[in-house]
Image: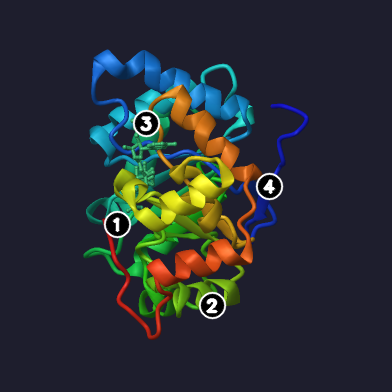
Amino acid sequence: MTAMTPHRTVALPSGRTVPALGQGTWYMGDDPGRREEELRALRTGIDLGMTLIDTAEMYGNGAAEELVGEAVRGRRDEVFLVSKVLPWNASARGTVTACHDSLRRMDTGHIDLYLLHWRGPVPLEETVEALERLEREGDIGGWGVSNLDVDDLDQLPAGARPETDQVLYNLTRRGPEYALFPRCRELAAPVMAYSPIEQGRLLGEPALAAVAEAHGVSPAQVALAWVLRHEDVIAIPKAATRQHVEDNHAALRLELTDEDLRTLDAAFPPPARKEPLEIL
Ligand SMILES: NC(=O)c1ccc[n+]([C@@H]2O[C@H](COP(=O)([O-])OP(=O)(O)OC[C@H]3O[C@@H](n4cnc5c(N)ncnc54)[C@H](OP(=O)(O)O)[C@@H]3O)[C@@H](O)[C@H]2O)c1
């Protein structure tokens, strides 16, 4: 990390802090021919302070977790690992089994933050009980949810304190700003924005390109700086090359002006009413 690199952290309800800019891993670990480059990318991210790594049992049926385990070998203490249980595994027993399987694949003794990937057939109460049990037993450092809209959050058992809600949020998916962000603020749970560059589809948008050109930066950096303009939002872009990781990291140095924000608002208007939470 260079002396110039700003450190930005976000506090979780438990008091733990995590970097505002982390790394995603969906579609990583699938192709043996890309493995070395992916490992280098993740390790470069850790070197740069993007030490929150998001993965899930779903990604490549465990292949992404195995890749993450290899990437953090010998430096597990530097990293904040996030993983997720699939909804159909999220029963009292299934959650515990899924977590233990994830621990084995990542070759680690604990997952720092374990999320319900999305709401499924198991009652939320049963899943939360299992997550709290895993936390008591030290298998996980804390738990949270993903893809839960306001009404789902309201149906969590009384007293339940998720550490985050990981949701789809980027310039083209601004719906959460209207009701979900305020609800998460009431819970003091930072939102974790997934697909912050819309899986690459955002990068050709003319308004984004114009702002990027004005600053002499890449469109990806503008997309990430825009998500990170909220002090309590974490962004987890996925980058499978060192070049992309370094490019994304530089977004921490980019400060968007009021004029930039107006340009982006004109092209990607904020929500005027509650919209259903979108999912990828
Ligand atoms: N909870 C959920 O339901 C859920 C759903 C979706 C995603 N997620 C999590 O969020 C993470 C991020 O979302 P995502 O992977 O869907 O999409 P994303 O991060 O918005 O976009 C990833 C794509 O953007 C490219 N990219 C990254 N940095 C770039 C740069 N600086 N310049 C140009 N292209 C760049 C990547 O290419 P390369 O790979 O070639 O670098 C990849 O094709 C996932 O990996 C996963 O961990 C969670």
The answer to which quarter of the image holds residue 154 is bottom left
Going from N to C along the chain, the mark reached first, 2 or 3, is 3
Mark 3 vs mark 4: in front: 4
Mark 2 vs mark 3: in front: 2
- Residue 91 is marked as 1
Q: Compute the Cα span from label 3 to label 4.
A: 26 Å
> Residue 240's spot in the image, x, y percent?
38, 28
Q: Compute the Cα span from label 1 to label 2.
A: 29 Å
> Residue 243's spot in the image, x, y percent?
46, 25
Q: Compute the Cα span from label 2 to label 4.
A: 21 Å
Residue 242 visible in rendering: yes
Q: Report the amino acid beneath label 1.
A: Ser
> Residue 230's spot in the image, x, y percent?
59, 63
Ligand 1 lies in quarter: top left
Say what secondary structure mark 4 lies in. Answer: loop
Task: Judge from the rendering whether residue 163 lies leftward or rightward of residue 37; answer left or right.
Answer: right
| Mark 4 residue's CB less than 8 Å from ligand 1 | no
- What residue does disc 4 label? 8
- Residue under the point 67% across and 49% down: 9
Going from N to C along the chain, the mark reached first, 1 or 3, is 3
Please, is residue 187 above or below residue 206 in the view? below
Going from N to C along the chain, the mark reached first, 1 or 2, is 1
Q: Report the amino acid beneath label 4.
A: Arg
Please, is residue 258 above or below residue 82 in the view? below
- For the residue carrying disc 3, how many other residues have a C-alpha within 10 Å: few (<14), some (14-19), or many (20+)? many
Q: Are the two marked residues, 2 and 4, in contact with CB atoms closer than 8 angstroms?
A: no
The answer to which quarter of the image holds residue 269 is bottom left
- What residue does disc 2 label? 182
Q: Are the two marked residues, 1 and 2, in contact with CB atoms closer than 8 angstroms?
A: no
